[in-house]
Amino acid sequence: MNITILTPDKEVFQGAVVSVKVPGTAGQFQVLKNHAPIVSSLEKGIVTVVTAVGEYRYYDVDTSTIKTESQPGKSITFNIGGGFIEVLNNNISLLVRGVKS
């Protein structure tokens, strides 16, 4: 699966993932490979992505820089202020407000 996480001013994560866990409006849920198509609003909370084999880029909140890595199985978390998720054909898009450490 491929995921892109965007805020209004920057790309926060882009790359291949095994799973993503998000704070949905009706409760937390996880997206795995071949998930049914969905569009959902997100509440303030934690987004957790688990990386797959391949290169990925992410925004490191501690250093305020974009990092590129290729470590499969790495769990990366982002604290978001809400937003939206779309899942379609193993492509995931998150549009979120404010990413904090």
Image (tube, rainbow, N blue to C red):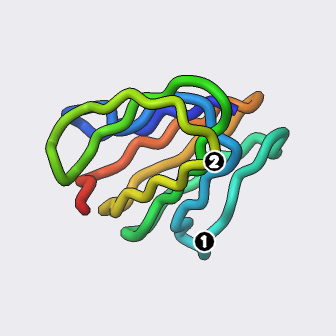
Residue positioned 37% across, 69% down in the render: 44
**In the displayed structure image, the side of residue 73 where residue 79 appears, left or right:** left
- Closer to the chain start, of discs 2 and 1, is 1
Nearer to me, 20 or 97? 20
SS at mark 1 in the image:
strand
The residue that disc 1 covers is 28
Q: Residues within 10 Å of mark 1 (few under 14, many from 20)?
A: some
Whether the residues at callouts 2 and 1 have beta carbons within 8 Å, the answer is no
**In the displayed structure image, the side of residue 16 where residue 43 appears, left or right:** left
Outermost residue on the front side: it is 71
Q: x, y percentage for residue 76?
A: 46, 53
Residue 73's label in the rendered image is 2
Q: Quadrant of residue 45?
A: bottom left
- Give above or below for 98 relative to 92: below
Outermost residue on the left side: it is 64
- Give above or below for 41 relative to 71: below
Q: Residues within 10 Å of mark 2 (few under 14, many from 20)?
A: some
- Which quarter of the image is occupied by the C terminus? bottom left
- Which quarter of the image is occupied by the N terminus? top right
Mark-to-mark CA distance, 2 and 1: 21 Å
Q: x, y percentage for residue 99?
A: 27, 54
Residue positioned 27% across, 45% down in the render: 60
How many marks the image carries: the answer is 2
Closer mark to the observer between disc 2 and disc 1: 2
Residue 47's label in the rendered image is none
Residue positioned 55% across, 37% down in the render: 71
**In the displayed structure image, the side of residue 11 where residue 29 appears, left or right:** right
